[in-house]
Image (cartoon, rainbow, N blue to C red):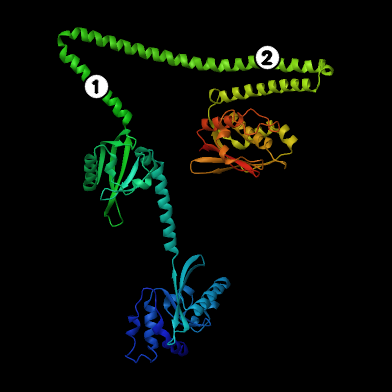
Amino acid sequence: MKRANKTTSKVIKNIKRPGSRVSRMKNLTKEKKSDEPFAPDPHSLQTLLNAWTESTELVAEDGTILALNEAAAKMAGKSPKELLGSCIYSHLPEASAKALKARIQSVLRTAHLERFEEKQNGRIIERTIHPVLDGRKKVKQLALYSRDITEQRLAEADSRNAMIYARNLIEASLDPLVTISPEGKIIDANKAAEEATGVTREKLIGSDFSDYFTEPDKARAGYQTALSQGKVRDLLLTLRHKSGRLMDVLYNAAVFRDEKGEIKGVFAAARDITALMRAEKELIKHQKHLKEMVRERTAELVQTNQRLEREIAERRLMEERLKQTMEDLRRSNQDLEQFAYVASHDLQEPLRMVSSFTQLLEKKYKDQLDDEGREFIKFAVDGANRMRRLINDLLAYSRVRTRGKEMEPTDSHSALGEALANLSAMVQESGAIITNDDLPVVKADKSQLIQLFQNLISNAIKFCSEDVPHIHISAEKQDNEWLFSVKDNGIGIEPQYYDKIFEIFKRLQRDEKYPGTGIGLAICKRIVERHNGRIWVESEPGKGSVFYFTIPI
């Protein structure tokens, strides 16, 4: 203990803790000449070290601990006596010791401070190494400060997550939302505010919020009411888009405060009531007109009553006609569906005849036809077959909404199994390897879910590369929906076609190697949308595609 204190007394004048003052050390010494060594008594040095709440150690060049405070011993989980005079590296895990030794060697070489973080027993420790210089400005010892910053880092992460969550909530709103400073300047705005004003968020921020209303003074008065009374409710204002378009809104605002309770600004929302206001103005207009009629034609009260009775009768008649129209529309939809079925049947019959007689023609006159004639017959047969497939797919596309069944709890794993059973011949012929994770029970139309899987898997097999098709189906539960994916190793899709492939009759491959009508993915999209979900694709040409779709929980 005496040796360690004697060594530290020669160099303690050069220790500078972050944020501390050298004057703390000066009070421990007597006046000395500038060339004399600084030598506080050991008891005062230990008292000073223990006064620091952070772990503090004085370390020799070889890692020997020359002095330390109670906080350092507590962090190491040992007594000061066990640590004093021992090698600091011996108390650390091998990896931590190696890293610390490298940093100490760096400080010894450069005489520059080193600050770093490391994980120790599940905690995050911030360490700072200060060079301690002798009279010749040479590094002789090092002061090592350690601080547990685990809670600080967790708090920072919580703060970041809270900010992200708050931002998502703001952006999810369909109403224009802004935060306004006490000076009336916009601090932040959501996407709806950009759309309502025609101004980007970057330009909105810093501008005066009242500039976007037709009555800026009224807007500012409402803002002052919110500041003075804490909130303002349903203030009628008119918002002006930069194009000149006007939007009637109900302005609601409330102050927000910091942790000290001081007002930092106002959070404001504008609800679009343009349609409501238009209807109200129209109603007021009619009411005014009616009052004028009553006032001007009091003598004609009987005639006015008769006129009103006629108007009421006409409205009733209109309601009856509307009901009849709706009933006619319902029957029309039924007739349209029946027509689609009959039309498809009547169209396919001539196509079958064309195909059959063309094939008979080929058999009967095969020897009389040259290569070109036989090729023409092949074109006719192929065209008829393609037309038949097109009619069937178009009929299936139209029936997604008209023939859909009620949504009910459906085992998607069972639906996948039925889809694979329907594709068994195609799977065997291609040698496709199809795997899947556990799939959930979802609320769906089972027959349409089977068709959805069948279309996506058949596409994956059809558009395979030269390799054996590998297809994997999985599902992941998210906040309020299930995210399904169908992954393949096929030819892939260029990014510019990600949206177009879901449009009806859109085909990216026209050659005979990839036959089809261009309706399959359009049917998939219509099925997913009927289930209130979304469908999209992510792909890399030559490496395969992943089709995603969601079904709400």
Residue 39 lies left or right of residue 485; in this view the side is left
Question: Which kind of residue does numbered mark 1 sit on?
Answer: Lys
SS state under label 2: helix
> Residue 162: where, in percent of width, then height?
41, 52
> Residue 531: where, in percent of width, then height?
52, 32
**Dot 2, how many residues are within 10 Å of its Cα: few (below 14), some (14-19), or many (20+)?**
few
Residue 141 lies left or right of residue 491; in this view the side is left
**Dot 1, how many residues are within 10 Å of its Cα: few (below 14), some (14-19), or many (20+)?**
few
The answer to whether residue 417 is seen in the rendering is no
Q: Tag count in the figure?
A: 2
Q: Mark 1 points at which residue?
A: 285
SS state under label 1: helix
Residue 99 lies left or right of residue 256; in this view the side is right
Q: Is residue 160 above or below residue 121?
A: above
Instruction: Give the spatial CA distance, label 1 vs label 2.
Output: 61 Å
Q: Which of 511 and 7 is in front in this view?
A: 511
> Residue 486: where, in percent of width, then height?
61, 40
Q: Which residue is drawn at 39% across and 15% down?
A: 322
Q: Residue at x 15, y 15 (%)?
A: 295
Q: Mark 2 points at which residue?
A: 350
The answer to whether residue 203 is seen in the rendering is yes
Question: Which kind of residue does numbered mark 2 sit on?
Answer: Pro
Q: Write down the quadrant of residue 513 in the picture.
A: top right
Do callouts 1 and 2 mark residues in contact (Cβ within 8 Å)? no
Q: Which residue is drawn at 67% across and 37% down?
A: 463
Sooner in the amino-acid sequence: mark 1 or mark 2: 1
Q: Write down the quadrant of residue 71 in the picture.
A: bottom left
